[in-house]
Amino acid sequence: IQLGATIDYAILMSTKYLGETFDIHGGGMDNIFPHHECEIAQSEASTGKPFVKYFIHNNLVTVNGQKMGKSLGNFITLPDLFKDYNPLVVRFCILLNHYRKPTDFNKEQLTEASKMYTKLTETINEVRNIIKDNTTCEPDTEIEELKNKFYEAMDDDFNTGLAISYLYEVIKIANKELTSTKDINKLTNINNFITEYGREPTQAEIDAIYDCYKAEECEDNSISYGWNYIYDATEEAMP
């Protein structure tokens, strides 16, 4: 069973969507052995090329503090979750936590993530309504410093939680400008930062997130397993 499942994923599906070698492979830490080791062996034996550059193994996914699992009857499917929450909010909620730490799904955290995401997008939209299509500006020391911190956080073992905290520092500066001088140069710097590091998904990417769990390959669409397919489908839709 392990061999069959691994061949199906590593050699057939991942090659179809991402090519013979791809940058990042996600998955639970409990899949390191034997699943991912089998994937590496079988894929590289088949193609003669490196399978993955980096593996990112997330910690346990829990629901209200209890490990998620079918045997426990507490697993959440993506279709059910998306009935109540925007997929981008769910992804944002996951990114608030470092992937090496356990991720707990509960209504309180998802609701709070939804509020944070809404405030973030509203501020960005206000900035863009003011600067219009302008992208030309002189470098702003304050924004450049936060941009460097954001980059360093992402470079430090994919520390998305810390990176997002710097993103919110930028949003605070934006809100201050929006209620005071509305400095076009600073607001343009902020927009350029968001465009570079916090790009909003295209409609094709949003559609891919909604549709990924409907794919034939995604037979198990629980959060603990199916979330990888969201990233794969989004990656495929990217321009």
Image (spheres, rainbow, N blue to C red):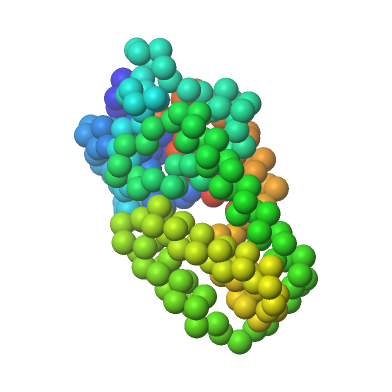
- 101 shown above or below 197: above
- Identify which residue, 114 or 16, lies in the foreground: 114
- 61 shown above or below 130: above
Which quadrant, please, contains the N terminus?
top left
Give percent across and percent down for residue 103: 37, 36
| Residue at x-position 44% and y-position 58% | 165
Which quadrant, please, contains the C terminus?
bottom right
Give percent across and percent down for residue 10: 38, 38
- Identify which residue, 239 or 16, lies in the foreground: 239
| Residue at x-position 46% and y-position 56% | 164
Q: Residue furthest left?
A: 33
Q: Is residue 84 left or right of residue 147?
A: right
Which quadrant of the structure image shows residue 180? bottom right
- Identify which residue, 181 or 208, lies in the foreground: 181
| Residue at x-position 57% and y-position 23% | 80
Q: Residue furthest front?
A: 180
| Residue at x-position 57% and y-position 63% | 171
Residue 67 visible? The answer is: yes
Give percent across and percent down for residue 82: 60, 30
- Identify which residue, 196 or 176, lies in the foreground: 176
Q: How many marks?
A: 0
Give percent across and percent down for residue 181: 69, 77
Residue 8 visible? The answer is: no
